[in-house]
Image (cartoon, rainbow, N blue to C red):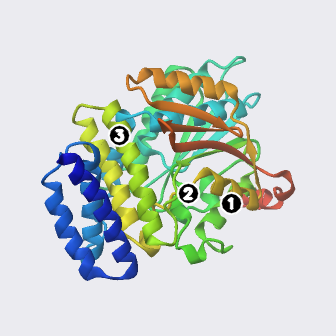
Amino acid sequence: MEEDSGIRLVHALMTCADSVQRGDFQLARTLIDQMNALLTRVNTGCGIGKVAGYFVDALSRRILGVGSAHAPAHENEILYHHFYEACPYLKFAHFTANQAILEAFEGHDCVHVIDFSLMHGLQWPALIQALALRPGGPPLLRLTGIGPPSPDGRDTLREIGLRLAELAQSVNVRFAFRGVAASRLEDVKPWMLQVGSNEAVAINSIMQLHKLLGPDLARNSQNSPIEAVLSWIQGFNPKIMTLVEQEANHNQLGFLDRFTEALYYYSTMFDSLEAACPIQPDKALAEMYLQREICNIVCCEGAARVERHEPLTQWRDRLGQAGFRPLHLGSNAFKQASMLLTLFSAEGYNVEETEGCLTLGWHSRPLIAASAWQASPAIVGPEMEANNDRNNND
């Protein structure tokens, strides 16, 4: 009986999404009522019942015009932390990016990491400790962390920087931190980052660039946020740009296609989370982190829809057209990422290497993709000089 109700739920979800796309909201409301009744017959604590419940709620919000509730940035950071603890996805992202950055910094005495989303600085203790053990001694490490303004007047970015500075001092790594408060990445201007001409620069973007893609009709515009940010990244001529993104296609123009892809993607994600983190409270808060992504994908349109995930193939095309060339993450990164998974008791996680990039997935479905990039030599130079002149004049 429960399995039959689960199948009927999936069919009803797809029919409801189709009716929303066609503008038949009367049918959509009827289907919402039917699905809420079906949810009483399935276990909503796990499996399809749980995932369906989140998608029914998101559809209800869209139909009623409630939209996705805008959560304070500090709440999102708390949920991010719990998602980090509950499953290997963010650990894989940080670990793989750090390994690539460490290799890119070989032979450089002054290095500068620009983190597009600092998020409690969870990624950086491991890099600081790795630099401390570098043959020949550690470099001077500058870290610029971008994050949202603190709502209560506290300088949260500075507090994170102080904690990292204490760690760096304890392992004899020269360290300087700069926090850049910005609600949106597109609000950051290159002069704010104070990049020096003698520094080896690494740009680190963990699940952030998709938020710049914006409404579909403007996505190829030279004035779009993604084009603007990629342009000033090129100007810095970084040794490396580490990019980790969801391996999904949630930026499709058609609502039904986007909804179908999201339902499949998050069903797999929740299956993996169930296996990796069977106990509370980390699991419940990690699920809330994913639920907010679902709500944004399903409820929102236009500038309000920021969870515009695209697969690695599309990022390759976009970055190639923007003047970037891929860097090979290497077999060593693959081996070490595979070893990371041994820390998790759940079987089913797997790392794959494709054309120098790494993906982490659950069984046969890749869920996040890590890649590394560098600005092509032909397009760097003048803008870098302009940025340095601006820094020297500030």
Above or below for 277 versus 239: above
Relative side of 94 to 152, left or right: right
* Picture quarter with the C terminus: bottom right
The answer to whether the residue labelled 2 contacts the one labelled 1, judged by CB atoms less than 8 Å apart, is: yes
Looking at marks 2 and 1 on the same chain, the residue that comes earlier in the sequence is marked by 2
Residue 318: give its label: 1
Q: Which residue is mark 3?
A: 271
Which secondary structure, mark 3? helix
Query: Does residue 16 appear to the left or right of 301 in the view shown?
Result: left
Mark 2, residue position: 310
Q: Amino acid at mark 2?
A: Glu
How far separated are the C-alphas under marks 3 and 2? 21 Å
Q: Is residue 184 above or below residue 79?
A: below
**Residue 24 quadrant:** bottom left
Between circles 3 and 1, the one closer to the viewer is 3
Give x and y (percent) for residue 56.
Answer: 26, 62
Q: Residues within 10 Å of mark 2 (few under 14, many from 20)?
A: some
First in residue order: circle 3 vs circle 2: 3
Q: Gap between marks 3 and 1, in whole Å?
A: 31 Å
Measured as percent of width and height from the top left, residue 323 is found at 77, 58
